[in-house]
Amino acid sequence: MNFLSEIFKRRGLIVGPLLVAAMAVLPLIDFELPGIFPGPSSNPGTLQILALALLIGSLALSYHLLLGVAGLLSFGHALYFAIGTYGLAILLRQTDIALLPAMLIVGLVGLVVAAVLGRISLQVSGIAFAMVTLAFAQAGSVLIRRNSEITNGEEGLPINTANVPDYLVGVVNTKNLFWLALVIAVIAFLLVTWFEKSRAGHVVAATRENELRVRVLGIRPTRVKILAVVSAGVIATVAGMVYFVLQSTASPANISADLTLTLLVIVVLGGVGSRWGALIGGVIYMILDQRLTSLARAPELKELPEFLYIPLSEPLFLLGSIFILVVLFLPGGFAGLAKRFRTGKRAKLKELA
Amino acid sequence: MSDVILLLMTGLGLGALYFLIAGGLSLIYGLMGVLNFAHGSFLTVGAIAGWEISKLLGGDSWGVLLISMVVGALVGAVVATATELLLIRPLYLRHIEQALITVGLSLASVALFEGIWGVDPNYVSRPPWLIEVTKIAGALVPNDRFLLIGSAVLVLFGMLAFLRYTRFGLIIRAGVENRAMVQALGIDVRRAFTLVFAIGGAVAGFGGVLASQYFGYVSPHLGGNLLIFAFIVTIIGGLGSLVGAAIASVLVAVLQQFANFYLGGTGDLVIVVLLIVVLLTRPTGLLGKRAH
Amino acid sequence: MSDLSVLELKGLGLSIGGARIINDVSFSVPQGQMLGLIGPNGAGKTTLFNLISGLMMPTEGEILLRGKSLSKQSIEARSRAGIGRTFQTSSLFPGLSAFENVRLAAQVKIGGEISLFKFPTRKDEASILTKQCLDEVGLAQSQHETLAGVLSHGDRRKLEIAMLLAMDPSVILLDEPMAGVASADVPGLVEVIRGVHSSGRTVLMVEHHIEIVLGLVDKVAVLHHGELLALDEPSKVMANETVQSAYLGEKP
């Protein structure tokens, strides 16, 4: 198709599929990355962490669609992730619907909620938009905590596997869930790319740059902004559903303000406006998050003086500190750094020639 | 009747805590345009400092409580001042980056608190009188409510007097109205920035000690839990308005208590709905002057 | 109203909190005319533009475009009806390329849904129109992929005009097109504006450089304290005594 070549011209066309193929064979081989992977790559523990990382990467991509593409600062994006985790958890527990139709229903719920709340919250802009979205997520959080007969409150709602196909249940099948997570990440990446390259994406980007000018051109910006909110919401919902199957529990942490803030941090670290930055940033963050806690128990680290040991064992401390340094000294995030490095190199080559 | 009085007093006490965070938050936003996510950590660090010093001194006397309040306020002020000088000032007037920095600081500081003091609540000792109750028109009101309300009222009037009667207060008030004009007059408004951070930090740190008295414990999430309500209060009251923050604090907290009691625990939900209604009908808040 | 008039203002007025910003302004602009709007600072020139393009709503009077009232319409609706404008400080999408800026306007003109399922390509109708417009204002090919935010002031102005050309509005409002442009770039820009006019378009222009206005326009309207003092051919307006005392007397 014609537009495909428009979308994936240059590097992405080669690097992307290669990367996906390399990831896809991981469960079949015993690739080791000491310190980063807890064991060989065919090990369910390793696959579990990688799958979680891919899903958080997808979630970060959906946040990139809001912040990087549409310029909307949301403090409540975790709401849609939690609609995914809790929606699927509740459907599987309360009804006899099979997994796939249940996922379709929950996805639809995410879409409708995003459309309705988007319509309301886009009445305001800037900090006020951030606050309204925070308030919506907070309301969701309250609903989850208060209705413990349905959501099991603070404990989190465990999965009911009666209607989940056998090949997605149990430690031996982690590799299938890993592949599922990989598919989700690829789809999320393609969808976000699609959005950015479409006419709607073009208008959304223009609205981010100068909303009044878009209106003076005769375009109503609200519609495309809602489109961005809905697309981001649906991607987050889908990521949430798979995350739930993988973790076997929907937990109140899925909707916390901290999760949204973490996404914000990931997207800014990766470089606002960079798809790869968001995806890779999400993946790296989740691997760090999963590994630092166990690394912190390593005997070598325990011997460090306390003032070094305590901060190093807290992933959020490291993330927050790195984030502060990047905002202060590295505008454009890591993607910006990579770009500068590349163009710098190219310029040098030209000089030599 | 006794229910109503108890709910009202509890709401006022909680409103006092909200105000002690929201007041500084609102001033900082009004003057500098910075949404300070680290403000909850200023409260937490004050609470922890107060708790540590009371452990050190031992006992549950009023004297110890008073000292820990002073220490909490001082530590809050020092941390806030350092934050402004080291992290906020280098990004002068770049509001989004400044807000992002405070997000990073809040994540990092809470994680650090967890690493050092653990995730579990640490229980504080309190002067015996605070745990007792006083009978008002049939209602048994815990005495700590009086301490909270009295302290918050003192802080409110102290801050208002500062804004009204001092040179810096005038600069801050003028800066909230029109920052560019203040600079055009040749006044270095950045000193006022540091000052509002110091004041906000002191008030939050002081509030931290009070919060630990009210809840009975200190935890790394003490400030973060209150911060969300303080944000809501700040928006409803109108960004930049101290009196607006005070009115909204009381409104939000009292409404929350009554809804929790009479509407089956829907207090938080009612507050969120109130925020949305205010934002959609009056985006500048109750007493807000300008939209950003 | 003459059948040929494109834009007509009827007793237009704006009061804010009791202050009269615009007071009973009426005039009509025939097809193909270029009308210069002059007056001292604070006379209400930009306000008048804001009223016409819908950024502000008039408290009295009416705005007619080809006989149809625009007074109650939104900004977007007026743009679609045929009002195109630029802003005093250049108003572009700084993070998008020059080509993308104009393409957005071309998209509106060509029509077609703004949807997720349509992709801009370099060969479609909107892109061809975009290229035409960029060529018409003389923005060099090498600049097409440059981000609008890093273009020179003069080129940004040209880019704005290219966006207007792509929209092909019935009436073009130019708000101080020379503001902030380096003096070396002014003659080139004047030629671009002259070209826009000579192709038969109806133009309203606010500009502080009087000599440029007088050299370009067919008619001049003088605003003072929100009122229309005079509207006539440039030479007659300059000879008008009221105008001289009210406006030219203050000329630096």
Image: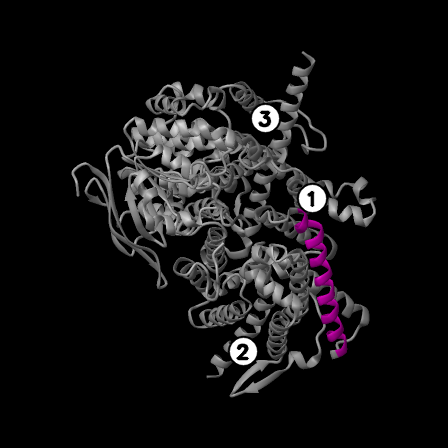
The chain ID associated with circle 1 is A
- Name the secondary structure under disc 1: helix
Residue C248 vs residue B222, the one in the foreground: C248
The chain ID associated with circle 3 is A
Mark 3 and mark 1 in contact? Answer it, CB < 8 Å.
no
- Name the secondary structure under disc 2: helix
Residue B16 vs residue C250, the one in the foreground: C250
Write the residue at 46% across / 46% down: A80
Spatial CA distance of label 1 from label 2 is: 42 Å
Q: By what rule are the colours in the image chosen?
A: one colour
**Which residue in the structure is indicated by mark 2?**
B9
- The image position of residue B218, as x and y in percent, is 68, 64
Inspect the magenta stretch and tell me whether residue B81 lies in it. yes
Magenta span of residues: B63-90
The type of residue carrying mark 2 is Met
Q: Is residue C121 above or below residue C186?
A: above
Residue A84 vs residue A349, the one in the foreground: A349
- The image position of residue C216, as x and y in percent, is 36, 32
Which quadrant does the N terminus of chain C fall into?
A: top left
**Which residue in the structure is indicated by mark 3?**
A27
The type of residue carrying mark 3 is Pro
The type of residue carrying mark 1 is Leu
The chain ID associated with circle 2 is B
